[in-house]
Image: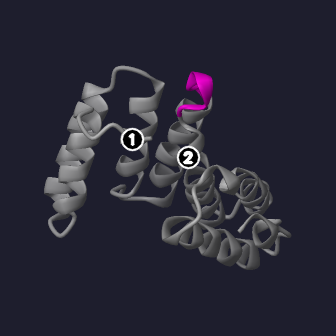
Amino acid sequence: MIDPTNPVVVLCAEGMAAEGTPAEARCLFERAWAARRDDYDAAVAAHFLARHQPSAADTLHWNALAVRHAEAVPGGRAAGLLASLYLNLGDAQASVGDVGAAAAAVQRAANHLAALPPGGYREFVALGIHRLAERVGAASDVDAAT
């Protein structure tokens, strides 16, 4: 899964801890982006940078970048990230009014849900997928995947 000694992961964890101070968190996420070594690192850092953008278009850019890098990770190493990344991409697409793309992202997120181990985090992501599906009027197989 996620290597807690990876410098990008360490910076992102520090950024999450600092999210009460958005400027500090964003600075840590930007440092994580600068420290990326491969597509996996880039996917993780872009995911967190997306959370601290000034506009919906910028949020969409970073979420799309996170997905693109995660999809490029070889050997299934990023499989556990994809359901959440597609969920965030779909939410960003819906926020800029691209409901069709958001509906497609809902299905992709649902398709990757099985890569998450059963438990609270998987249920949390499944709930997000379900809510986004309702928001954009999309069918999803999320109930079958949980």
Q: Amino acid at mark 1?
A: Ile
Q: Amino acid at mark 2?
A: Gly
Give the position of the N terminus as an image quadrant: top left
- Local secondary structure at mark 2: helix
Does 108 sit above or below residue 75?
below
Q: Is residue 7 left or right of residue 36?
A: left
Q: Is residue 122 left or right of residue 48?
A: right
Q: Residue at position x 18%, y 61% from top? A: 17
Q: Nearer the viewer, residue 99 or 79?
A: 79
Q: Residue at position x 78%, y 57% from top? A: 107
Q: Colour scheme used in the picture?
A: one colour
Q: Residue at position x 52%, y 37% from top? A: 65
Alpha carbon separation for disc pair 2 and 1: 9 Å
Which contiguous range is marked in magenta? 72-77
Q: Is residue 138 left or right of residue 2?
A: right
> Which residue extends farthest front?
118
- Which residue is identified by label 1? 2
> Does 76 lie within the magenta span?
yes
- Which residue is identified by label 2? 80
Q: Quadrant of residue 96?
A: bottom right
Q: Are marks 2 and 1 in contact (CB under 8 Å)?
A: yes
Few, some or many residues within 10 Å of mark 1 (<14, 14–19, 20+): few
Q: Nearer the viewer, residue 141 or 120?
A: 120
Does 143 sit above or below residue 15?
below
Residue 26 tag number:
none
User: Could you say where residue 2 lies in the image, as x and y percent from the top left?
Assistant: 39, 41
Does 78 sit above or below residue 27?
above
User: Could you say where residue 85 lies in the image, as x and y percent from the top left?
Assistant: 56, 50
Q: Quadrant of residue 11?
A: top left
Few, some or many residues within 10 Å of mark 2 (<14, 14–19, 20+): some
> Does 25 lie within the magenta span?
no
Q: Residue at position x 54%, y 72% from top? A: 124
